[in-house]
Amino acid sequence: MSDMLGARVLYRGILALILLIFASGVPAHAGFLYLLNDDSTGNRIYGFRVNEATGELTALSGFPVNAAVGGINNIVSERMTVDSLNGRLYVVNEGSDSVSVYSIDRGSGAIAAMPFSPISLGTGVWNTIAVHPSGSPMIVANNSLNGVVQSFVITPSTATPAAGSPFGVGSAAGFSSHFSVNGNYYYVGGNQGANIAGFSVDAGSGVLTTLAGSPFASGGTASLAYGTDAAERLFAVDNTFFIRVFTSTSGVLSPVTGNPFTSGLTQRRFGLVHHNQNFYIVAGNTGNNVGVFQISGSGSATTVVPVAGSPFATGGTTANALALNQAGTFLFVGNRISRNVTKFTLDPATGILSGQTVQASNTLGTVGAINGIGYLPDPMASNARIGGLIADANGGGLGRVFVQLTSMDGMTNDLVITNPFGFYNFPSVATGTTYTLIPVGKGYSFTPPSITFNHIGDATSQNFTGEEN
């Protein structure tokens, strides 16, 4: 009887804490959205302030900002990226064989060229850029079979090629690229061939080491639209528009059992995984739409299926690049040919898109093409995400595990519950403070029992293993 009473008290206490958390709400902040108009007469960067509560876009003063010569003839989508930790914006100037780098004013959204900008790349067709979660290295890939990637160590005042750079990718092509969520691995492939190259990454030196077995057979031709998640899976779409999913062990890719998966798309370009790890989202390019896919299962049993209503029409021409706001409640689509932005409201529980609003055509210029996008989250509050996976010893996700987040200064005491696949997510947590994470699940003990760390940026790989008592 006493055990039952104790369980009821514990349940009521947890329920009260949950109600308190939801009653307190999340304050509305603003982020900054940037888009690249890729133009052979000169790249132009457009900037907007994003209202986190409504998704409303307000054009920033002083934009567009002119960069160097671009190259609109290439149908690409990854020529811009943002280092959210250090507040830097990167733009590939393909026609100039260079990268322009800007510091972002976290108050106004204004950008200023960094001392080492532009970075020379050498002759090539440079189509995809990615930056390590820590802000260095920055990697740019050349779009040709048996091509190369350039790795640069970035500091506030210098950009230095890593020892041994450029690095060969073997029989893969640099059209789409992505770091693993923890930054330990880098993957690149593209619109030629059927392979994906993989490297381990030394974040300090920027040196890339080819993974055993790389390049990896993708199972389909020209797999693009890469996305990665905290479970170290890689998602892509091939040129027959089937989704390909891979697990990884020490970075080495293996296709899941159910490959390939039907997408319902008629084209593909840019891809990402939602902050809550439940959805893979793909820009449908000339299909003028966006596909959203529910991620289910774990390990080799992972599956993806379209959510209800997918794909969703954008109302623009050539959906080419995607960005989520900080809370993951709004999706922004850069439309390549109509040169405008479509905003959707995104339901984080179902993945369904609604409330479409579309800027007027040519809002982002009357010539050129929208070939890049980047988002700097909540710069005024300096918030970032914390999350991870809680799984059993076999890698299967554990649902309905409580995860408590506590700050050392006592100002934060938050609680979430893992979803049915074992993932948890705190979408907006103040940085610059030390936090402790503690999982609690009836009948389970966890390894490690807690994690304490200094939160300086997105921390989405705070993983635990649960064992039955």
Image (tube, rainbow, N blue to C red):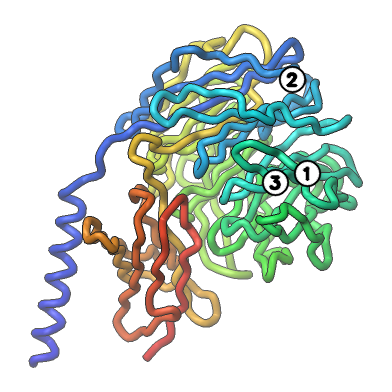
Point out which mark residue 161 bears: 1
Q: Which residue is mark 2?
A: 70
When the figure is inspected, residue 264 is found, relative to residue 90, above or below; the finding is below
Work out how far the residue at label 2 is from the one at label 3, CA to CA, in angstroms: 24 Å
Is residue 62 at all visible to an observer of this figure? yes
When the figure is inspected, residue 243 is found, relative to residue 53, above or below; the finding is below
When the figure is inspected, residue 35 is found, relative to residue 260, above or below; the finding is above
Point out which mark residue 27 bears: none
Q: Nearer the viewer, residue 188 or 222?
A: 188
Question: Which amino acid type is shown beneath numbered disc 1?
Answer: Pro
Residue 87 in the image: x percent, y percent? 51, 36
Asked if marks 1 and 3 touch (Cβ < 8 Å), the reply is yes
Work out how far the residue at label 1 is from the one at label 3, CA to CA, in angstroms: 6 Å
Q: Earlier in the sequence, mark 1 or mark 2?
A: 2
Q: Earlier in the sequence, mark 1 or mark 3?
A: 3
Dot 3, crowdedness within 10 Å: few (<14), some or many (≥20)? Answer: many
